Image: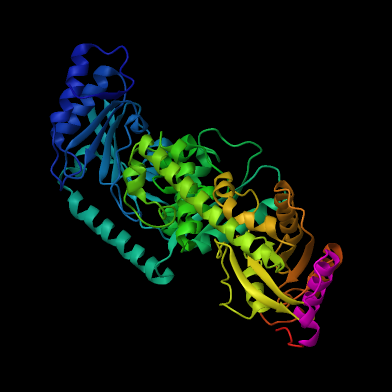
Protein backbone atom coordinates (compact mmCIF):
# COMPACT_ATOMS: atom_id res chain seq x y z
CA UNK A 1 0.00 0.00 0.00
CA UNK A 2 1.24 3.47 -0.83
CA UNK A 3 2.16 5.77 2.04
CA UNK A 4 -0.56 7.70 3.85
CA UNK A 5 0.39 11.12 5.24
CA UNK A 6 -1.08 13.20 8.04
CA UNK A 7 -2.89 11.98 11.14
CA UNK A 8 -3.62 8.28 10.58
CA UNK A 9 -3.40 7.25 14.22
CA UNK A 10 -6.38 5.24 15.43
CA UNK A 11 -7.66 4.39 11.94
CA UNK A 12 -8.75 0.82 11.30
CA UNK A 13 -6.70 -1.19 8.82
CA UNK A 14 -9.75 -1.41 6.54
CA UNK A 15 -10.01 2.36 6.37
CA UNK A 16 -6.30 2.69 5.71
CA UNK A 17 -6.67 0.21 2.86
CA UNK A 18 -9.54 2.22 1.36
CA UNK A 19 -7.49 5.41 1.59
CA UNK A 20 -4.51 3.67 0.02
CA UNK A 21 -6.69 2.56 -2.89
CA UNK A 22 -7.09 6.23 -3.85
CA UNK A 23 -3.61 6.02 -5.38
CA UNK A 24 -5.17 3.95 -8.17
CA UNK A 25 -7.49 6.77 -9.22
CA UNK A 26 -6.75 8.88 -12.29
CA UNK A 27 -8.35 12.15 -13.37
CA UNK A 28 -8.35 13.33 -17.02
CA UNK A 29 -5.88 16.19 -17.56
CA UNK A 30 -8.70 18.41 -18.83
CA UNK A 31 -10.83 17.94 -15.68
CA UNK A 32 -10.50 19.33 -12.16
CA UNK A 33 -11.89 16.14 -10.61
CA UNK A 34 -14.37 13.42 -11.49
CA UNK A 35 -17.78 12.69 -9.97
CA UNK A 36 -16.62 9.25 -8.81
CA UNK A 37 -13.55 10.69 -7.10
CA UNK A 38 -15.55 13.43 -5.35
CA UNK A 39 -18.16 10.98 -4.02
CA UNK A 40 -15.52 8.48 -2.85
CA UNK A 41 -13.50 11.22 -1.16
CA UNK A 42 -16.57 12.58 0.67
CA UNK A 43 -17.60 9.11 1.85
CA UNK A 44 -14.12 8.25 3.13
CA UNK A 45 -13.84 11.60 4.90
CA UNK A 46 -17.12 10.96 6.69
CA UNK A 47 -16.02 7.45 7.70
CA UNK A 48 -12.70 8.58 9.20
CA UNK A 49 -14.28 11.71 10.68
CA UNK A 50 -11.42 13.88 9.42
CA UNK A 51 -10.59 15.90 6.31
CA UNK A 52 -8.88 13.99 3.52
CA UNK A 53 -6.51 15.67 1.06
CA UNK A 54 -5.27 14.54 -2.35
CA UNK A 55 -2.29 15.77 -4.34
CA UNK A 56 -2.67 15.25 -8.09
CA UNK A 57 -0.14 15.85 -10.86
CA UNK A 58 -1.15 17.81 -13.93
CA UNK A 59 -1.62 14.60 -15.90
CA UNK A 60 -4.20 13.45 -13.35
CA UNK A 61 -1.99 10.91 -11.56
CA UNK A 62 -2.43 10.61 -7.79
CA UNK A 63 0.80 11.58 -6.01
CA UNK A 64 -0.14 11.74 -2.31
CA UNK A 65 -3.02 11.00 0.07
CA UNK A 66 -3.19 12.61 3.51
CA UNK A 67 -5.58 12.53 6.44
CA UNK A 68 -5.88 16.18 7.40
CA UNK A 69 -6.01 19.52 5.66
CA UNK A 70 -3.92 20.63 2.69
CA UNK A 71 -0.87 21.36 4.86
CA UNK A 72 -0.63 17.65 5.75
CA UNK A 73 0.39 16.78 2.19
CA UNK A 74 4.11 16.44 1.41
CA UNK A 75 5.61 19.24 -0.65
CA UNK A 76 6.47 17.83 -4.08
CA UNK A 77 9.72 18.50 -5.87
CA UNK A 78 9.15 21.45 -8.15
CA UNK A 79 10.55 21.50 -11.65
CA UNK A 80 9.09 24.84 -12.72
CA UNK A 81 10.70 28.12 -13.62
CA UNK A 82 10.35 30.86 -11.02
CA UNK A 83 7.46 32.43 -12.96
CA UNK A 84 5.47 29.20 -13.47
CA UNK A 85 3.12 27.01 -11.46
CA UNK A 86 4.18 23.79 -9.78
CA UNK A 87 2.24 21.32 -11.90
CA UNK A 88 0.24 19.94 -8.95
CA UNK A 89 -3.25 20.57 -7.59
CA UNK A 90 -4.97 19.79 -4.30
CA UNK A 91 -8.47 18.37 -3.81
CA UNK A 92 -9.55 17.99 -0.19
CA UNK A 93 -12.64 17.85 2.00
CA UNK A 94 -14.09 20.12 4.67
CA UNK A 95 -16.41 18.46 7.15
CA UNK A 96 -17.59 21.69 8.72
CA UNK A 97 -17.95 23.82 5.59
CA UNK A 98 -16.83 27.42 5.63
CA UNK A 99 -14.90 27.54 2.39
CA UNK A 100 -11.15 27.78 1.87
CA UNK A 101 -9.22 28.56 5.04
CA UNK A 102 -6.24 30.87 5.45
CA UNK A 103 -3.87 27.85 5.73
CA UNK A 104 -5.37 26.51 2.47
CA UNK A 105 -4.59 29.75 0.63
CA UNK A 106 -1.16 30.01 2.23
CA UNK A 107 -0.35 26.47 1.07
CA UNK A 108 -1.60 27.28 -2.45
CA UNK A 109 0.54 30.37 -2.68
CA UNK A 110 3.75 29.24 -1.00
CA UNK A 111 4.07 26.13 -3.16
CA UNK A 112 2.51 27.63 -6.30
CA UNK A 113 0.05 24.83 -6.79
CA UNK A 114 -2.04 24.93 -9.96
CA UNK A 115 -5.21 25.16 -7.89
CA UNK A 116 -6.87 24.07 -4.66
CA UNK A 117 -10.40 22.73 -4.22
CA UNK A 118 -12.30 22.24 -0.99
CA UNK A 119 -15.39 20.01 -1.05
CA UNK A 120 -17.94 20.59 1.72
CA UNK A 121 -19.15 17.22 2.98
CA UNK A 122 -22.57 16.61 4.56
CA UNK A 123 -23.80 13.13 5.52
CA UNK A 124 -21.04 11.53 3.50
CA UNK A 125 -21.86 13.36 0.26
CA UNK A 126 -20.18 16.29 -1.50
CA UNK A 127 -22.31 19.43 -1.38
CA UNK A 128 -20.39 22.54 -2.43
CA UNK A 129 -17.05 23.18 -4.09
CA UNK A 130 -14.69 26.07 -3.28
CA UNK A 131 -12.01 26.78 -5.87
CA UNK A 132 -8.97 29.09 -5.86
CA UNK A 133 -5.91 29.52 -8.06
CA UNK A 134 -3.08 32.01 -8.36
CA UNK A 135 -3.39 35.06 -10.58
CA UNK A 136 -0.67 36.83 -12.60
CA UNK A 137 1.34 39.18 -10.34
CA UNK A 138 -0.11 42.63 -10.89
CA UNK A 139 -0.03 45.71 -8.66
CA UNK A 140 -2.86 46.09 -6.15
CA UNK A 141 -4.10 42.55 -6.88
CA UNK A 142 -4.55 39.63 -4.52
CA UNK A 143 -2.16 36.74 -4.96
CA UNK A 144 -5.04 34.41 -5.77
CA UNK A 145 -8.57 34.33 -7.13
CA UNK A 146 -11.29 32.70 -5.02
CA UNK A 147 -14.42 31.62 -6.88
CA UNK A 148 -17.84 31.80 -5.18
CA UNK A 149 -19.06 28.58 -3.60
CA UNK A 150 -20.90 26.48 -6.20
CA UNK A 151 -22.62 23.07 -6.28
CA UNK A 152 -19.93 20.41 -6.33
CA UNK A 153 -20.91 19.08 -9.77
CA UNK A 154 -20.54 22.53 -11.42
CA UNK A 155 -16.89 21.88 -12.24
CA UNK A 156 -17.34 18.37 -13.65
CA UNK A 157 -17.60 19.61 -17.26
CA UNK A 158 -15.35 22.67 -16.85
CA UNK A 159 -12.36 22.63 -19.21
CA UNK A 160 -9.78 22.88 -16.46
CA UNK A 161 -6.89 22.11 -18.79
CA UNK A 162 -7.64 25.05 -21.09
CA UNK A 163 -8.00 27.46 -18.16
CA UNK A 164 -4.69 26.31 -16.73
CA UNK A 165 -2.93 26.72 -20.08
CA UNK A 166 -4.23 30.29 -20.39
CA UNK A 167 -3.01 31.11 -16.89
CA UNK A 168 0.46 29.68 -17.61
CA UNK A 169 0.67 31.71 -20.83
CA UNK A 170 -0.15 34.93 -18.98
CA UNK A 171 2.43 34.16 -16.29
CA UNK A 172 5.05 33.52 -18.98
CA UNK A 173 4.14 36.71 -20.83
CA UNK A 174 4.59 38.85 -17.73
CA UNK A 175 7.87 37.10 -16.92
CA UNK A 176 9.16 37.87 -20.42
CA UNK A 177 8.20 41.54 -20.00
CA UNK A 178 10.17 41.69 -16.76
CA UNK A 179 13.22 40.17 -18.42
CA UNK A 180 13.06 42.72 -21.23
CA UNK A 181 12.89 45.53 -18.69
CA UNK A 182 15.86 44.34 -16.64
CA UNK A 183 18.08 42.70 -19.23
CA UNK A 184 19.87 39.53 -18.17
CA UNK A 185 20.26 40.36 -14.47
CA UNK A 186 18.99 37.92 -11.88
CA UNK A 187 16.11 39.51 -9.92
CA UNK A 188 16.79 39.31 -6.19
CA UNK A 189 15.20 40.34 -2.90
CA UNK A 190 17.45 41.48 -0.07
CA UNK A 191 16.64 40.68 3.55
CA UNK A 192 18.52 42.62 6.19
CA UNK A 193 18.12 41.76 9.86
CA UNK A 194 18.42 44.40 12.56
CA UNK A 195 19.54 42.61 15.72
CA UNK A 196 19.82 45.85 17.64
CA UNK A 197 22.46 47.63 15.52
CA UNK A 198 20.25 50.69 15.01
CA UNK A 199 21.24 52.97 12.08
CA UNK A 200 24.12 50.65 11.22
CA UNK A 201 21.57 48.04 10.09
CA UNK A 202 20.55 50.33 7.21
CA UNK A 203 24.20 50.76 6.20
CA UNK A 204 24.65 46.99 6.22
CA UNK A 205 21.62 46.63 3.96
CA UNK A 206 23.06 49.25 1.59
CA UNK A 207 26.29 47.29 1.51
CA UNK A 208 24.37 44.08 0.80
CA UNK A 209 22.71 45.84 -2.14
CA UNK A 210 26.11 46.84 -3.52
CA UNK A 211 27.34 43.26 -3.11
CA UNK A 212 24.29 41.98 -5.01
CA UNK A 213 24.86 44.51 -7.80
CA UNK A 214 28.49 43.47 -8.07
CA UNK A 215 27.39 39.83 -8.36
CA UNK A 216 25.18 40.75 -11.31
CA UNK A 217 21.83 40.83 -9.51
CA UNK A 218 18.94 43.24 -10.02
CA UNK A 219 17.60 44.27 -6.62
CA UNK A 220 13.80 44.53 -6.89
CA UNK A 221 13.00 44.78 -3.18
CA UNK A 222 14.77 45.44 0.11
CA UNK A 223 13.38 44.39 3.48
CA UNK A 224 14.86 45.27 6.86
CA UNK A 225 13.48 43.01 9.58
CA UNK A 226 13.90 43.81 13.27
CA UNK A 227 14.55 40.68 15.32
CA UNK A 228 16.56 40.76 18.57
CA UNK A 229 17.17 37.02 18.06
CA UNK A 230 16.97 34.99 14.88
CA UNK A 231 14.23 32.43 14.47
CA UNK A 232 16.03 29.06 14.76
CA UNK A 233 14.17 27.63 11.77
CA UNK A 234 13.26 30.47 9.40
CA UNK A 235 15.60 33.25 10.62
CA UNK A 236 12.91 35.94 10.14
CA UNK A 237 9.87 33.88 11.10
CA UNK A 238 7.35 32.07 8.90
CA UNK A 239 4.95 35.02 8.70
CA UNK A 240 7.64 37.27 7.25
CA UNK A 241 8.61 34.50 4.82
CA UNK A 242 5.04 34.47 3.49
CA UNK A 243 5.27 38.23 2.90
CA UNK A 244 8.63 37.88 1.14
CA UNK A 245 7.29 35.08 -1.03
CA UNK A 246 4.38 37.32 -2.05
CA UNK A 247 6.80 40.11 -2.97
CA UNK A 248 8.93 37.66 -4.95
CA UNK A 249 5.84 36.48 -6.82
CA UNK A 250 4.75 40.00 -7.76
CA UNK A 251 8.28 41.11 -8.65
CA UNK A 252 9.12 37.91 -10.55
CA UNK A 253 12.17 37.42 -8.31
CA UNK A 254 13.74 34.00 -7.89
CA UNK A 255 16.36 34.63 -5.18
CA UNK A 256 16.37 35.68 -1.53
CA UNK A 257 19.67 37.07 -0.23
CA UNK A 258 20.05 37.38 3.55
CA UNK A 259 22.44 39.85 5.13
CA UNK A 260 23.45 37.37 7.85
CA UNK A 261 25.02 33.93 7.74
CA UNK A 262 22.38 31.20 7.81
CA UNK A 263 22.85 27.78 9.31
CA UNK A 264 22.45 24.84 6.92
CA UNK A 265 19.13 23.99 8.61
CA UNK A 266 17.82 27.55 8.21
CA UNK A 267 18.82 27.77 4.55
CA UNK A 268 17.15 24.45 3.80
CA UNK A 269 13.95 25.32 5.68
CA UNK A 270 13.63 28.72 4.00
CA UNK A 271 14.17 27.25 0.54
CA UNK A 272 11.65 24.52 1.27
CA UNK A 273 9.06 27.03 2.50
CA UNK A 274 9.49 29.60 -0.29
CA UNK A 275 10.66 27.47 -3.23
CA UNK A 276 13.16 30.26 -3.97
CA UNK A 277 16.93 30.14 -4.20
CA UNK A 278 18.39 31.22 -0.85
CA UNK A 279 21.83 32.75 -0.32
CA UNK A 280 23.44 34.24 2.74
CA UNK A 281 26.04 37.01 2.90
CA UNK A 282 29.07 34.71 2.89
CA UNK A 283 27.83 32.82 -0.16
CA UNK A 284 27.30 36.13 -1.96
CA UNK A 285 30.82 37.33 -1.18
CA UNK A 286 32.28 33.99 -2.26
CA UNK A 287 30.36 34.27 -5.52
CA UNK A 288 31.79 37.75 -6.16
CA UNK A 289 35.31 36.48 -5.51
CA UNK A 290 34.69 33.64 -7.98
CA UNK A 291 33.35 36.13 -10.52
CA UNK A 292 36.48 38.30 -10.32
CA UNK A 293 39.10 35.55 -10.03
CA UNK A 294 41.27 35.61 -13.14
CA UNK A 295 44.68 34.25 -12.17
CA UNK A 296 45.47 30.64 -11.13
CA UNK A 297 46.31 31.89 -7.63
CA UNK A 298 43.01 33.74 -7.18
CA UNK A 299 41.00 30.86 -8.64
CA UNK A 300 42.65 28.39 -6.28
CA UNK A 301 42.05 30.65 -3.27
CA UNK A 302 38.38 31.15 -4.16
CA UNK A 303 37.77 27.45 -4.75
CA UNK A 304 39.43 26.59 -1.45
CA UNK A 305 37.28 29.12 0.42
CA UNK A 306 34.10 27.84 -1.24
CA UNK A 307 34.84 24.18 -0.52
CA UNK A 308 35.71 24.91 3.11
CA UNK A 309 32.45 26.83 3.48
CA UNK A 310 30.32 24.20 1.77
CA UNK A 311 31.86 21.04 3.26
CA UNK A 312 30.03 21.22 6.62
CA UNK A 313 26.87 22.19 4.73
CA UNK A 314 26.74 19.12 2.52
CA UNK A 315 24.45 17.40 5.03
CA UNK A 316 20.96 18.84 4.82
CA UNK A 317 21.20 20.59 1.46
CA UNK A 318 19.59 17.60 -0.20
CA UNK A 319 18.72 17.75 -3.87
CA UNK A 320 19.92 21.31 -4.10
CA UNK A 321 23.43 19.86 -4.52
CA UNK A 322 22.56 18.22 -7.83
CA UNK A 323 20.87 21.30 -9.31
CA UNK A 324 22.88 22.31 -12.37
CA UNK A 325 21.55 25.86 -12.36
CA UNK A 326 23.30 29.12 -13.03
CA UNK A 327 23.26 32.59 -11.56
CA UNK A 328 24.42 34.06 -8.29
CA UNK A 329 25.87 31.53 -5.85
CA UNK A 330 26.81 28.86 -8.43
CA UNK A 331 30.13 30.17 -9.75
CA UNK A 332 33.55 28.84 -8.81
CA UNK A 333 34.06 25.11 -8.29
CA UNK A 334 30.63 24.43 -9.82
CA UNK A 335 27.72 22.25 -8.81
CA UNK A 336 29.35 19.09 -10.14
CA UNK A 337 32.15 19.36 -7.54
CA UNK A 338 29.51 19.48 -4.82
CA UNK A 339 28.21 16.08 -5.88
CA UNK A 340 31.39 14.25 -4.90
CA UNK A 341 31.67 12.71 -1.46
CA UNK A 342 33.39 14.22 1.55
CA UNK A 343 36.56 12.22 1.02
CA UNK A 344 37.15 13.57 -2.47
CA UNK A 345 36.34 17.13 -1.38
CA UNK A 346 38.81 16.76 1.48
CA UNK A 347 41.48 15.61 -0.97
CA UNK A 348 40.75 18.61 -3.20
CA UNK A 349 41.07 20.98 -0.24
CA UNK A 350 44.43 19.39 0.63
CA UNK A 351 45.74 19.83 -2.93
CA UNK A 352 44.56 23.45 -3.10
CA UNK A 353 46.15 24.23 0.27
CA UNK A 354 49.49 22.87 -0.91
CA UNK A 355 49.25 24.81 -4.18
CA UNK A 356 48.56 28.06 -2.35
CA UNK A 357 51.46 27.38 0.01
CA UNK A 358 53.76 26.99 -3.01
CA UNK A 359 52.51 30.31 -4.40
CA UNK A 360 53.12 31.96 -1.03
CA UNK A 361 56.67 30.57 -0.97
CA UNK A 362 57.35 31.92 -4.45
CA UNK A 363 56.11 35.34 -3.38
CA UNK A 364 58.32 35.28 -0.28
CA UNK A 365 61.33 34.58 -2.47
CA UNK A 366 60.36 37.45 -4.76
CA UNK A 367 60.06 39.76 -1.75
CA UNK A 368 63.53 38.69 -0.53
CA UNK A 369 64.93 39.63 -3.94
CA UNK A 370 63.31 43.05 -3.71
CA UNK A 371 64.66 43.45 -0.19
CA UNK A 372 68.23 42.92 -1.37
CA UNK A 373 67.72 45.79 -3.80
CA UNK A 374 66.47 47.98 -0.91
CA UNK A 375 63.56 49.44 -2.86
CA UNK A 376 60.95 50.70 -0.35
CA UNK A 377 57.54 49.01 -0.50
CA UNK A 378 54.33 51.00 0.00
CA UNK A 379 51.21 48.82 0.44
CA UNK A 380 47.75 50.17 -0.39
CA UNK A 381 44.93 48.87 1.80
CA UNK A 382 41.37 49.90 2.50
CA UNK A 383 37.73 48.96 2.54
CA UNK A 384 36.54 47.36 -0.67
CA UNK A 385 35.71 49.83 -3.46
CA UNK A 386 37.58 52.67 -1.73
CA UNK A 387 39.57 53.36 -4.90
CA UNK A 388 42.82 51.48 -4.16
CA UNK A 389 43.41 50.29 -7.73
CA UNK A 390 42.73 53.75 -9.16
CA UNK A 391 45.20 55.25 -6.67
CA UNK A 392 47.82 52.66 -7.68
CA UNK A 393 47.36 53.66 -11.31
CA UNK A 394 47.64 57.36 -10.44
CA UNK A 395 50.83 56.90 -8.41
CA UNK A 396 52.58 54.70 -10.98
CA UNK A 397 50.95 56.05 -14.14
CA UNK A 398 50.42 52.46 -15.31
CA UNK A 399 47.50 50.13 -15.73
CA UNK A 400 43.76 50.56 -16.13
CA UNK A 401 41.42 52.49 -13.88
CA UNK A 402 39.68 50.47 -11.20
CA UNK A 403 36.08 49.27 -11.50
CA UNK A 404 33.21 50.67 -9.45
CA UNK A 405 32.56 47.24 -7.95
CA UNK A 406 33.34 45.46 -4.73
CA UNK A 407 36.36 43.13 -4.64
CA UNK A 408 37.50 44.02 -8.16
CA UNK A 409 41.09 43.21 -7.06
CA UNK A 410 41.73 39.69 -5.73
CA UNK A 411 45.48 39.32 -6.10
CA UNK A 412 48.43 41.46 -4.98
CA UNK A 413 49.56 43.75 -7.78
CA UNK A 414 52.98 45.40 -7.47
CA UNK A 415 54.16 48.22 -9.74
CA UNK A 416 57.26 50.38 -9.73
CA UNK A 417 56.65 54.09 -9.16
CA UNK A 418 58.69 57.24 -8.71
CA UNK A 419 58.53 59.92 -6.00
CA UNK A 420 60.07 63.32 -6.82
CA UNK A 421 63.07 64.04 -4.61
CA UNK A 422 63.17 60.46 -3.32
CA UNK A 423 63.44 57.94 -6.13
CA UNK A 424 61.91 54.56 -6.93
CA UNK A 425 59.25 52.95 -4.77
CA UNK A 426 57.25 49.73 -5.17
CA UNK A 427 53.49 50.21 -4.73
CA UNK A 428 51.43 47.09 -3.91
CA UNK A 429 47.65 46.88 -4.23
CA UNK A 430 45.86 44.31 -2.04
CA UNK A 431 42.42 42.76 -1.71
CA UNK A 432 39.83 45.01 -0.07
CA UNK A 433 38.45 44.49 3.43
CA UNK A 434 34.82 44.33 4.47
CA UNK A 435 33.05 44.14 7.81
CA UNK A 436 32.52 40.63 9.12
CA UNK A 437 34.89 39.17 6.54
CA UNK A 438 34.06 35.45 6.18
CA UNK A 439 36.74 33.44 8.03
CA UNK A 440 37.12 31.12 5.03
CA UNK A 441 38.20 34.06 2.91
CA UNK A 442 40.63 35.45 5.48
CA UNK A 443 42.32 32.04 5.65
CA UNK A 444 42.37 31.51 1.90
CA UNK A 445 43.80 34.95 1.14
CA UNK A 446 46.54 34.84 3.76
CA UNK A 447 49.09 34.63 0.94
CA UNK A 448 47.73 37.90 -0.43
CA UNK A 449 47.77 39.65 2.91
CA UNK A 450 51.34 38.51 3.63
CA UNK A 451 52.47 41.25 1.25
CA UNK A 452 51.61 43.72 3.99
CA UNK A 453 54.28 42.37 6.36
CA UNK A 454 57.01 43.43 3.93
CA UNK A 455 55.66 46.97 3.55
CA UNK A 456 57.68 49.97 4.79
CA UNK A 457 54.54 52.12 4.72
CA UNK A 458 50.82 51.34 4.51
CA UNK A 459 48.49 53.74 2.69
CA UNK A 460 45.04 53.31 4.19
CA UNK A 461 42.54 54.52 1.57
CA UNK A 462 39.17 55.79 2.84
CA UNK A 463 36.26 56.54 0.52
CA UNK A 464 35.07 60.06 1.39
CA UNK A 465 31.73 59.48 -0.38
CA UNK A 466 30.81 56.35 1.57
CA UNK A 467 28.17 56.40 4.27
CA UNK A 468 29.91 55.22 7.41
CA UNK A 469 33.43 56.06 6.17
CA UNK A 470 34.69 56.20 9.75
CA UNK A 471 33.21 52.77 10.39
CA UNK A 472 35.02 51.45 7.32
CA UNK A 473 38.26 52.93 8.64
CA UNK A 474 37.70 51.22 11.99
CA UNK A 475 37.01 47.83 10.37
CA UNK A 476 40.25 47.93 8.35
CA UNK A 477 42.34 49.12 11.30
CA UNK A 478 40.97 46.33 13.50
CA UNK A 479 41.84 43.74 10.88
CA UNK A 480 45.37 45.15 10.49
CA UNK A 481 45.79 45.12 14.27
CA UNK A 482 44.69 41.46 14.38
CA UNK A 483 47.39 40.72 11.82
CA UNK A 484 49.99 42.37 14.04
CA UNK A 485 51.00 44.83 11.33
CA UNK A 486 53.46 47.38 12.70
CA UNK A 487 54.38 49.40 9.58
CA UNK A 488 53.69 53.16 9.68
CA UNK A 489 50.33 54.17 8.26
CA UNK A 490 49.15 57.15 6.28
CA UNK A 491 45.44 57.75 5.68
CA UNK A 492 44.38 58.80 2.17
CA UNK A 493 40.92 60.39 1.94
CA UNK A 494 39.95 59.51 -1.64
CA UNK A 495 37.21 60.57 -4.08
CA UNK A 496 37.12 64.22 -2.98
CA UNK A 497 35.87 65.11 -6.47
CA UNK A 498 32.49 63.60 -5.52
CA UNK A 499 32.48 64.06 -1.75
CA UNK A 500 30.63 66.66 0.26
CA UNK A 501 33.18 69.35 1.32
CA UNK A 502 32.12 69.09 4.96
CA UNK A 503 32.57 65.29 4.97
CA UNK A 504 35.98 65.68 3.36
CA UNK A 505 37.23 68.19 5.94
CA UNK A 506 35.80 66.13 8.81
CA UNK A 507 37.63 62.99 7.65
CA UNK A 508 40.88 64.87 7.04
CA UNK A 509 40.78 66.30 10.54
CA UNK A 510 39.71 63.18 12.42
CA UNK A 511 42.01 60.78 10.55
CA UNK A 512 44.91 63.17 9.92
CA UNK A 513 44.66 62.17 6.27
CA UNK A 514 45.65 63.53 2.88
CA UNK A 515 42.72 64.42 0.62
CA UNK A 516 43.07 63.27 -3.00
CA UNK A 517 41.09 62.43 -6.08
CA UNK A 518 42.89 59.45 -7.59
CA UNK A 519 40.64 59.66 -10.64
CA UNK A 520 41.37 63.32 -11.39
CA UNK A 521 44.91 63.42 -9.96
CA UNK A 522 44.15 66.11 -7.36
CA UNK A 523 46.25 66.10 -4.17
CA UNK A 524 48.80 63.56 -5.47
CA UNK A 525 51.80 65.87 -5.04
CA UNK A 526 50.95 66.50 -1.39
CA UNK A 527 50.45 62.74 -0.92
CA UNK A 528 53.85 62.04 -2.50
CA UNK A 529 55.45 64.58 -0.20
CA UNK A 530 53.88 62.96 2.88
CA UNK A 531 55.02 59.51 1.73
CA UNK A 532 58.60 60.75 1.30
CA UNK A 533 58.63 62.27 4.79
CA UNK A 534 57.40 59.06 6.38
CA UNK A 535 59.91 56.88 4.49
CA UNK A 536 62.83 59.13 5.39
CA UNK A 537 61.63 59.31 8.99
CA UNK A 538 61.63 55.49 9.04
CA UNK A 539 65.32 55.37 8.15
CA UNK A 540 64.93 54.85 4.40
CA UNK A 541 66.89 57.75 2.86
CA UNK A 542 66.27 59.10 -0.62
CA UNK A 543 68.30 57.70 -3.47
CA UNK A 544 71.31 60.03 -4.10
CA UNK A 545 70.50 60.74 -7.74
CA UNK A 546 66.82 61.56 -7.05
CA UNK A 547 67.59 65.16 -5.95
CA UNK A 548 68.64 65.97 -9.53
CA UNK A 549 65.45 64.54 -11.11
CA UNK A 550 62.43 66.84 -11.15
CA UNK A 551 59.85 64.67 -12.91
CA UNK A 552 56.36 65.72 -11.70
CA UNK A 553 53.73 63.48 -10.18
CA UNK A 554 50.44 62.87 -11.97
Q: From the top left corner, tell me how far across and down residue 296 is, in percent.
A: 45, 59
Residue visible at 25% across and 46% down in the picture: 87
Would residue 530 appear left or right of 447 to someone viewing this image? right
Q: Is residue 36 above or below residue 383?
A: above
Is residue 545 covered in magenta?
Answer: yes
Q: From the top left corner, tell me how far across and down residue 196 is, in percent.
A: 70, 43
Q: Which one is in front, 342 or 487? A: 487
In which quadrant of the rendered image does the N terminus lie?
A: top left
Q: Residue furthest front?
A: 372
Whether residue 352 is visible to the viewer of this picture, yes or no, is yes
Q: Which one is in front, 202 or 325? A: 325
Q: Is residue 128 above or below residue 416?
A: above
Q: From the top left corner, tell me how far across and down residue 229 is, in percent.
A: 63, 36
Write down the region rendered in magenta.
524-549
In which quadrant of the rendered image does the C terminus lie?
A: bottom right
Residue visible at 44% across and 52% down in the picture: 329
Residue visible at 64% across and 58% down in the picture: 451
Q: From the top left corner, tell me how far across and down residue 152 is, in percent.
A: 23, 38
Q: Which one is in front, 506 or 130? A: 506
Question: How many tags in the picture?
Answer: 0
Would residue 374 appear left or right of 10 to someone viewing this image? right
Would residue 33 appear left or right of 206 to someone viewing this image? left
Q: Is residue 135 above or below residue 154?
A: below
For residue 135, what is the image quadrant?
bottom left
Is residue 210 covered in magenta?
Answer: no
The structure's colour scheme is rainbow
Q: Main secondary structure of the magenta part?
A: helix
Amino acid sequence: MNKLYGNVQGLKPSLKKKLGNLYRRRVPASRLYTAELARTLAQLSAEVGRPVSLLLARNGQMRAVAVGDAAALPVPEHAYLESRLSGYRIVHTHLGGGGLSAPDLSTLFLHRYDSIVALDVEEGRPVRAHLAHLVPPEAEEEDWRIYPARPWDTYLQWDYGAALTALEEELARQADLRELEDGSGERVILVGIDEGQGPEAELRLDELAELARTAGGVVVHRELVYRPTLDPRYAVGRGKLVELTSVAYHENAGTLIFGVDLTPAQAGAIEQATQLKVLDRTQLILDIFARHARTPQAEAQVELAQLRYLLPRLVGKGKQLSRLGGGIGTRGPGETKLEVDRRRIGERIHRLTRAIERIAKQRREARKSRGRNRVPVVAIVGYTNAGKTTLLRALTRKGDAGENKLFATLRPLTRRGYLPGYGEVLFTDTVGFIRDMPPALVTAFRATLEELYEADLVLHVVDATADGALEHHRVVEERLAEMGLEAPRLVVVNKIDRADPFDRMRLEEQLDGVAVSALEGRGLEELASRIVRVLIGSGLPAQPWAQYDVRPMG
